Image: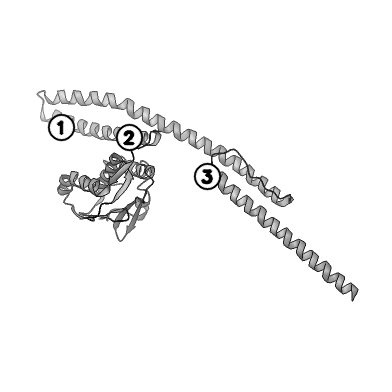
Amino acid sequence: MLWLWLFISGLILVIVLLLIKIHLLRKSAKEIECSFAEKLITDSNTLIDISSNDKYMCHLANEINIQLRKLRAERRKFQKGDIELKNAVTNVSHDLRTPLTAIYGYLDLLEQEEKSEKVNRYIAVIKNRTEMLKQLTEELFRYSVILTSEEDLKIEPITINNVLEESIASFYTILKEKQISPKIIIPQKKIVRNLDRSALSRIFANLLNNVVKYSNGDLEVTLFENGEIHFINHASNLTEIEVGKLFDRFYTVNNARNSTGLGLSISKALVEKMNGTISAEYNNEMLNICIVFDL
């Protein structure tokens, strides 16, 4: 019987040691998981460190640290390149504004001169192309300023109802010309959020411009009491793939010839600067752009 008790005691001891080992491994794995998640979101040069002396867990942590160093190097390279690109766009767009203004001035002078019908057509084409170039330059400049500016927005309590009504009213003539009949649903209750009024107006203007480009003749704007704003319109010329790229920089749908591809990108950047979210859905040829500003 003694040998049986010794066997059972030895087995229990082994099980206890295995349980302790498993507990320590789980603890190390949890430390690696938490530390890795922290390193990904923080701008720090520290590496993953674990309390365990287990060679396999130490090897795992070391391999992750190697990949973490590579990831940080790539991130720094991307951030540097992104900053350089934004600064270059800002400088180029700024430098183009002066000669464009001069071109406009000379075109105005030419229009005052006597000229043939053929020359008038040429001038009209030049002016139209210059206007498109000016629009692109202005959008580039605004977009780069929004992304590179370190100044905070003027955040204050804003009644979304009022800004939305003003924005829609300013587009009344354009919507009427495009034969778009808007259906507007705004609650009586004042929806107040801490926002920048100018930025919010620009967001609504860009979304309404988007409606003018893609709507088949309808528009429904709804403001909900929870701070959601929906812009819904029938857009049969779009596809789900195109809708998925609407917020990408410089992306334009094929039939949007006069678009810079920056309007919705600017809206997204401004919404996120004010701690909101913006998304687009496309179901049954209906485009739904939703903005959410939580309390």
How would you rate the neighbour count of disc 1 (Cα within 10 Å): few for under 14, some for 14-19, many for 20 or more? few
Measured along the vertical axis of the image, is residue 240 above or below residue 273? below
Residue at image mark 2? 142
Inter-mark Cα distance, 1 to 2: 32 Å
Circle nearer the viewer, 1 or 2: 2
Inter-mark Cα distance, 3 to 2: 28 Å
Query: Which SS class for mark 2?
Result: helix
Where residue 83 appears, x then y in whole percent? 45, 33
| Residue type, numbered disc 1 | Arg
Q: Residue at x 54, y 42 (%)?
A: 42
Q: Which mark is residue 41?
A: 3
Which callout, 3 or 2, points at the residue further toward the start of the chain? Answer: 3
Query: Which SS class for mark 1?
Result: helix
Side (left or right) of 240 relative to 221: right
Side (left or right) of 258 relative to 295: left
Q: Residue at x 28, y 39 (%)?
A: 198
Q: Quadrant of the N terminus?
A: bottom right
Which callout, 3 or 1, points at the residue further toward the start of the chain? Answer: 3
Residue farthest left in this picture: 114
Question: Does residue 252 appear anywhere in the picture?
Answer: no
Residue at image mark 1? 121
Where residue 44 appears, x then y in whole percent? 57, 39
Where residue 5 appears, x then y in whole percent? 86, 72
Measured along the vertical axis of the image, is residue 244 above or below residue 261? below
Inter-mark Cα distance, 3 to 1: 57 Å
